[in-house]
């Protein structure tokens, strides 16, 4: 895989994942789970920005980005949704870490990917914490916690 192929795949993944999060957030909001919806929508916005950063970097590297979006499932069950995020982030992290070595001669891109890794690690920690919370207080209480205003 070339560096640009990796970056194109990253943009495709972020755009798709961002849309998945935004649909999940809208579904949660429709059920009144405003607090959880806001958190998931923020993740969607963050990944949309990340995808755009990748495309901007591709342009700086002399490449024209393409319109591409990786397909992601829409999951209505809250616990399954969080478990999916947990699995997805757990897989994305080593994939991005491994790719860092490709950018030893390109500090700007390397720094960008490092920031993605830090953000994704944050998200993974948040998801793990919430799965833990569900285990401790039960789904019914968790839903009450996530209603918000
Ligand atoms: Fe995500
Ligand atoms: Fe993320």
Image (spheres, rainbow, N blue to C red):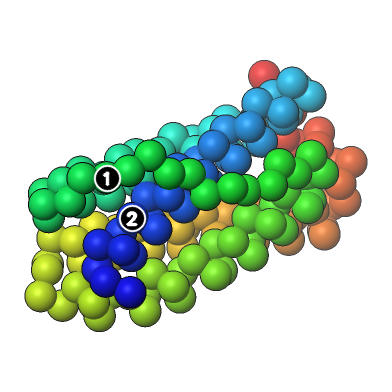
Determine the secondary structure under disc 2. helix
Instruction: Locate residue 143: give its quadrant.
Output: top right
Query: Which image quarter is the C terminus in?
Result: top right
Q: 13 and 142: which one is in front?
A: 13
Which image quarter holds the N terminus? bottom left
Viewed as shown, does residue 93 lie left or right of 29?
left
Q: Residue at x 46, y 69 (%)?
A: 93
Residue 65 badge: 1
**Tag 1 or tag 2, which sits nearer the N-term?**
2
> What's the distance in space between the residues labelled 2 and 1, CA to CA?
7 Å
Residue 118 appears anywhere in the view: no
> For the residue with label 2, is its CB less than 8 Å from the closest atom of ligand 1?
no
| Left or right: 4, with 92 as reference point | left
Circles 2, 1 touching at the beta carbon (< 8 Å): yes
**Residue for badge 2:** 8
Q: Residues within 10 Å of mark 1 (few under 14, many from 20)?
A: some
Graded by Cα atoms within 10 Å as few (under 14), some (14 to 19) or many (20 or more), the crowding at tag 2 reads many
Q: Number of numbered discs present?
A: 2
Q: Is residue 38 above or below residue 142?
A: above
- Residue 40 in percent (x, y) is at 58, 38
> Which quarter of the figure has residue 113?
bottom left
* Residue 77 screen position, x and y as percent: 82, 44
């Amino acid at each position: 895989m070339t560096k640009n192929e990796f970056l194109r795949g990253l943009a495709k993944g972020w755009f798709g994942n961002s849309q998945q999060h935004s649909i999940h957030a809208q579904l949660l909001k429709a059920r009144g789970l405003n607090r959880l919806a806001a958190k998931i929508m923020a993740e969607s916005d963050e990944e949309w920005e990340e995808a755009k950063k990748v495309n901007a970097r591709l342009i700086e590297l002399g490449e024209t980005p393409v319109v591409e979006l990786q397909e992601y499932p829409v999951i209505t069950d809250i616990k399954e949704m969080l478990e999916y995020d947990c699995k997805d982030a757990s897989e994305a992290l080593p994939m991005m870490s491994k790719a860092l070595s490709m950018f030893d001669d390109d500090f700007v891109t390397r720094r960008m990917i490092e920031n993605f890794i830090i953000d994704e690690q944050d998200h993974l920690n948040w998801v793990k914490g919430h799965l833990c919370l569900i285990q401790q207080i039960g789904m019914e209480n968790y839903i009450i916690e996530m209603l918000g205003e």
